[in-house]
Image (cartoon, rainbow, N blue to C red):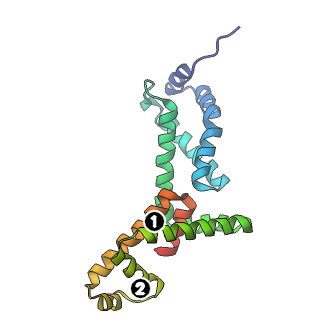
Amino acid sequence: MDRIPSEDEILLRMMQGDESAFTTIYRHYHASLYIYLLRFCKIPSLAEDLVHDVFLKVWEIRERINPQLSFSGYLYRIARNHVIKTINKLATDQQLREQVFKLLDTADGPEQMVRTKEYEQLFKEALDKMPRQRLKVFQLCRQEGKSYDEVALELGISRNAVKKHMVLGMRFIYDYVHRHGDILLAVYIAQKIF
């Protein structure tokens, strides 16, 4: 009876360019990595794309893998970094954001209602944690639609101070939702406030 190779042996073979070893690693980690990424993005097709991206990256940098360290830890770190990079890209790429929102628009009504409530709750929590002056500036500019000059005059501060409060406030809200929500909520909030 043939002995089953250890994960270390399979990793070493993959590092040397053995595609069948890579396939074995892929099959072993695919499901758990997919579930991990789905928790962030909530769209199965996007999670699947992210999984493929992560494994493509692993293949590209296979020679640099340190077999003395935990491969699963390494794999999940790559996945987490890739999700963060994707979030940042979604936040700044209008066309990509629109594609994601098209996927969201096709979501079932109740699921979309839950997502909207999650967004509203996280948005409210972020506002509650903002410094009082920054919150006041944000409310006057975004919720009441006043110009920076009008807010500066009303609060007795400079226009530059208003602008700085707005930049820091929007960044704080986005970061808060990113830390406490998922990728789509972070993109949704970016769409709403930027």
The three-letter amino acid code for the residue at tag 2 is: Leu
Q: Secondary structure at mark 1?
A: helix
Front residue of 96/30: it is 30
In the image, residue 109 sits, relative to residue 150, either above or below, namely above
Using the numbered discs, state the Cα–Cα distance from disc 2 to disc 1 in whole angstroms. 19 Å
Front residue of 41/86: it is 41
Q: Find residue 11 and report its horizontal and vertical position in percent.
A: 53, 25
Q: Find residue 10 and report its horizontal and vertical position in percent.
A: 56, 22
Front residue of 189/123: it is 123
* Residue with the most extreme top position: 1
Evaluate whether residue 95 shows in this view. no
Residue located 63% across and 45% down the image: 35
Q: In the rendered image, which residue does mark 1 sit on?
A: 174
Q: In the rendered image, which residue does mark 2 sit on?
A: 140
The three-letter amino acid code for the residue at tag 1 is: Tyr
Residue located 31% across and 87% down the image: 155
Image quarter (top left, top right, bottom left or bottom right) of the N terminus: top right
The numbered disc on residue 37 is: none
Evaluate whether residue 2 shows in this view. yes
Q: Quadrant of the rendered structure where residue 188 is?
A: bottom right
In the image, residue 134 sits, relative to residue 72, either above or below, namely below
Residue located 52% across and 33% down the image: 72
Q: Secondary structure at mark 2?
A: helix
- Name the N-terminal-most of marks 2 and 1: 2
Q: Residues within 10 Å of mark 1 (few under 14, many from 20)?
A: many
Residue located 60% across and 17% down the image: 5
Q: Residues within 10 Å of mark 2 (few under 14, many from 20)?
A: some
Q: Is residue 26 left or right of residue 16?
A: right
Query: Disc 2, disc 1: CB below 8 Å?
Result: no
Q: Find residue 80 and report its horizontal and vertical position in percent.
A: 49, 46
